[in-house]
Amino acid sequence: MNNPLLAAFDTAPFDKIKNEHFKPAFLKAMEDARAEIDAITENSEAPTFENTIEALEFSGQQLDRISSIFFNLNSAETNEEIQKIAQEVSPLLSEFSNDITLNERLFNRIKTVYGQRESLDLNPEQQTLLEKKYKHFSRNGANLPEDKKKRLRQIDSELAQLKLKFGENVLAETNKYELHLTNEDDLAGMPEGEKEAAAQLAKSKGKEGWLITLDYPSYIPFMKYADNRELRKELALAFGSKGFHGDELDNSDIVLQIAKLRHERANLLGYKTHAHFVLEERMAETPEKVHDFLNELLEKAKPAAEREFKQLADFAKEVDGIEQLQKWDGSYYSEKLKQKLFDLDDEKLKPYFKLENVIAGVFKVAEKLFGLQFEEVFDIAKYHEEVKTYRVYDQDKNFIAVFYADFHPRKGKRGGAWMTSYKPQYIRNGENVRPHISNVCNFTPSTPSKPSLLTFNEVTTLFHEFGHGLHGMLANTTYPSLSGTSVYWDFVELPSQVMENWCYEKEALELFAHHYETGELIPMELVKKIKESATFQEGMQTLRQLSFGLLDMAWHGIDPTGITDVKAHESKAFENTDLYPETKETCMSTAFSHIFQGGYSSGYYSYKWAEVLDADAFAYFKEKGIFNREVATKFKENVLSKGGTENPMVLYKRFRGAEPKVDALLQRAGLLEPSE
């Protein structure tokens, strides 16, 4: 079989890959990687950093590339066949990974080198790699007796399949629900552009009228603008009950199984809970520190959130006589109140944020800060015609990265927005191998009468994911496993969140916020209003983020073996952060993909943690000028290019000169009391 995945390739050969290529490619690449591991363990020479640690680091590279191509497709362009292959190969990969980490001869060689580390004269990056390799083995059971190693393998195999099933169910639930409207009155309040998008969606599925789905670009505008309260309720309950219908797509049991298996795994390895295990490798270090951090912010945000909620409830009562504000009223009345207070609504802003202009804008910001040039190219294979491809160069025309961008929802694409990599950066045999990075989003597509116009929230999302992208593109490290976004999880959101700040600055907006029809620059009073409204309902927003972090810790920071009712457990976790009345039909946990499918278990707090870092970092830019090259270069050299080569706090202090203070965040969010 002539398999393009097993041939030498630079960019992913999407135009040649067929689904039937994947499984044989995985099997062959695993076989080759095993041979590379055998060569290390059978080496008759004494273990050294080079023949053991470096050799291990550069083993299995083909398998890694095949995996990144396959699992990225499973997120961005999946189908039943790909999902079936994922179910088949995931346990095999999990077993392969365990074969390595539980390989005694290999671990003994690593242990020997680790034991000599003081006398080896290693540079900081080599020290980090050695430490990481040793910990990877010890934290994954290399020191366990045989019977416990066997159980660990079973757990890992089960978890791999459960996480996949969880994600498949959420995607199926999202695709299954449709609100099909044939009476135009049901769309009262909706802006023309949103109605047109709903009509186009209906037409694409061979239906009359309008279609609203649970994809964000369809769901959010309806919740924000539709006057029909009953329909908002129906949609909100459908969105909030994904994976919670007691049918074959129900995730309740999967949630309990995942939480219990993670806990058992942590116990096997000598940790009190899954959170204790995870946080050992995070800036926060312990569950206690995470709870202290979340509760400190909760104390600051809750009074503001309660004031804001009362203001919103009073407003809804005054305007429409609403006696009890419900979850499906939040977005709708927030938008109306925001318009009243700031005379600002997304529909006024959207004409200034044509997708192509915003892309050009984010590229321009990257050029002004880091000297990068983005050149769209048409000779790189892609997995869908909507994907755009770029080659990235620095100011001296040195090649920096390949960049893929995929912006609109599709049937085979999961919701949300993310950055990923198809090829890591590393240096080997004197060659600096450059990375292939991708941003995937779900923005409102163009319609027959309008191009893709972004809400301001979508603009910040694009900048956010691009920040992750820069972290990948500007990587400059020796080892792939320490490159780009391979950093502590509570540090990984700093580059992305700091980039969002440019969206609020006049100097940056002038680069790209031009009216799509007239070319007119966004009026400065609108910019002023964007800034003024940036802290609108910040207390409520903060409370919402904290509630997710607390729910995550409620699943992973305790012994979950006694939990039998997912909803009851969740309600208890939300006790201190709930503003709206409880809805018995909904459950967040059953669709909380970040923690049950993605990598955020025991790490959801990191969004807020990184916000402290980003507010503090951006304060430095503000002080010196938002396009100050000196500050940008310090950020690039100490944060963006360094990946996980050193402890993140060491890197941050090298950039900033001091540890971050929470004050910058509280001030930016308007959560400091006037007397403070």
Image (tube, rainbow, N blue to C red):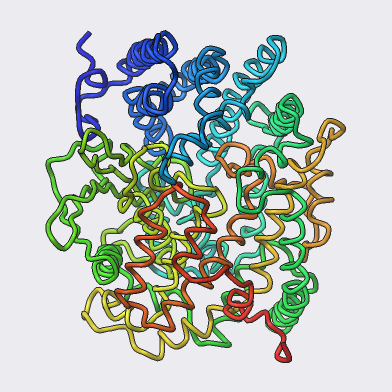
Q: How many marks?
A: 0
Residue 177 screen position, x and y as percent: 55, 42
Residue 632 screen position, x and y as percent: 34, 70
Please say whether residue 202 is visible from this viewpoint: no
Position of 214 with respect to 423 (left or right) is: right
Relative to 664, residue 465 above or below: above
Relative to 341, residue 165 above or below: above
Residue 551 screen position, x and y as percent: 73, 49
Position of 357 with respect to 609 (left or right) is: left
- Image point (58%, 27%), residue name: 165
Nearest the viewer among 232 and 53 is 53
Relative to 179, residue 599 above or below: above
Position of 425 with respect to 135 (left or right) is: left
Which of the 4 quarters of the picture holds residue 394? bottom left
Nearest the viewer among 17 and 638 is 638
- Image point (40%, 66%), residue name: 459
| Image quarter in which the C terminus is found | bottom right
Relative to 506, residue 131 above or below: above
| Image quarter in which the N terminus is found | top left
- Image point (53%, 73%), residue name: 616
Residue 323 screen position, x and y as percent: 80, 74
- Image point (70%, 90%), residue name: 674
Position of 609 with respect to 65 (left or right) is: right
Furthest residue to the front? Answer: 119
Please say whether residue 38 is visible from this viewpoint: yes
